Image: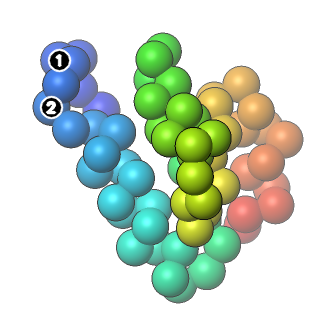
Amino acid sequence: MASFKGGVGKTTTAVHLASYFSNQGDTLLIDGDPNRSATGWSKRGQLPFTVIDERQAAKYVPKFK
């Protein structure tokens, strides 16, 4: 999800899509937002998928192929 405008639901949409795809197998959501909203949500509760920030992508992406 990408847009320059804030408040359009990018993080919410990404979290919902990741939740849907997690029903089909291991799912990785890469949080590229400077606010790290998805990362913050993942720390508050159990999401059925892994959330990382883009700095960790090189380490995690090979495990999710």
Q: Check disc 2: other Cα within 10 Å, few if <14, some if 14-19, many if 20+.
A: few
Estimate the x, y position of residue 49 in percent, counting from the top left.
Answer: 60, 62
Percent of width and height locating residue 63: 81, 61
Instruction: Give the amino acid type for the residue marked by disc 1 in the picture.
Output: Lys
Q: What is the quadrant of residue 16 in the picture?
A: bottom left
Q: Which amino acid type is marked by label 2? A: Val
Q: Are marks 1 and 2 in contact (CB under 8 Å)?
A: yes
* Residue at 21 percent of width and 38 percent of height: 9
Q: Position of residue 41 (x, y in %)?
A: 50, 41
Q: Quadrant of residue 12?
A: top left
Q: Is residue 18 left or right of residue 40?
A: left
Check disc 1 and report the residue beneath it: 5
Q: State whether residue 28 appears in this view.
A: no
Vertical placement of residue 30 versus 18, above or below? above
Image quadrant where one finds the N terminus: top left
Q: Is residue 13 above or below residue 27?
A: above
Q: Nearer the viewer, residue 42 or 26?
A: 42
Task: Give the residue at x 44% y 67%.
Answer: 19
- Secondary structure beneath dot 1 equals loop
Q: Residues within 10 Å of mark 1 (few under 14, many from 20)?
A: few
**Can the viewer see residue 17 in this picture?**
yes
Q: Residue at x 30, y 32 (%)?
A: 2
Residue that label 2 marks:
8
